[in-house]
Amino acid sequence: MNFTEVPFTDPNAARIYRDYMNRVRRIARKLDRATQQEIVMEINSHIYESFQAEPTMGAHETEKLLGTLEHLGQPELFLKPLIADQAMDQAMRTFNPIKVVRALLLNLSNGISYVLFALCYLFLFSFLLLIVLKELFPTEVGIYYDYNRFFAIGMVDSRYQNLKVADEYFTPIMLLLSAVVYLIITFLLKIKRSLNRKRTA
């Protein structure tokens, strides 16, 4: 579906409308093109429908448009949590590390829940990185354990090499831990979306 501007006879109303839509586009630029268009079209549709309900002409258009935009709110404020959530969804779908970092940075101001997301992603990337390092440094990388005294995953000092355990299962264990963390992230996202829907309902 193509974007169609809401037509105005009053040039002041047209200028205010275009400025508002440009602000929406600028904020939505952090998302993929399809999601950007979806957000812009939805807001545009809301403005269009408000004028279809009570058609106005001339200078009254500006007054009605300002009332509609006031009802919508400042896009920099009301779009911020939506953009942040959409960015996190995209990061989850693509599993692109750059998108994940951007999404987490966008969401840090949204509360402590995203600090938890950041920690989960850190663990997830760490486990996957360890699988790669194990292939590159098979004797140095491993799981090290000594009952009640020492536990480590990764690379340790040579004096702890005798504490290496389950070396032949290292990669499956890391894959299992990665899967568990991924499921935790997915579960947390579902909970957050559910809470967001309840807040906006």
Image (tube, rainbow, N blue to C red):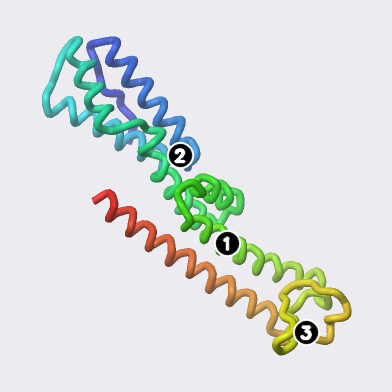
Tell me the CA gap for discs 2 and 3.
Answer: 49 Å
| Type of the residue with mark 2 | Arg
Tag 3 secondary structure: strand
- Please identify the quarter of the rendering in which residue 164 is found: bottom right
Disc 3 target residue: 164
Front residue (pair 86, 112): 112
Image point (49%, 55%), residue name = 114
Where residue 103 appears, x then y in whole percent? 52, 49
**Residue under numbered circle 2:** 33
Extreme residue in the bottom direction: 147
Q: Is residue 122 left or right of residue 13?
A: right
- Secondary structure, mark 1, is helix
Q: Secondary structure at mark 2?
A: helix
How many numbered callouts? 3
Q: Which residue is mark 1?
A: 119
* Residue 23, horizontal then vertical, whole percent: 41, 27
Q: Amino acid at mark 3?
A: Lys
At a point 58% along the width and 71% down the height, the residue shown is 178
Q: Quadrant of the N terminus?
A: top left
Question: Which numbered disc, 2 or 3, marks the residue closer to the eye?
Answer: 3
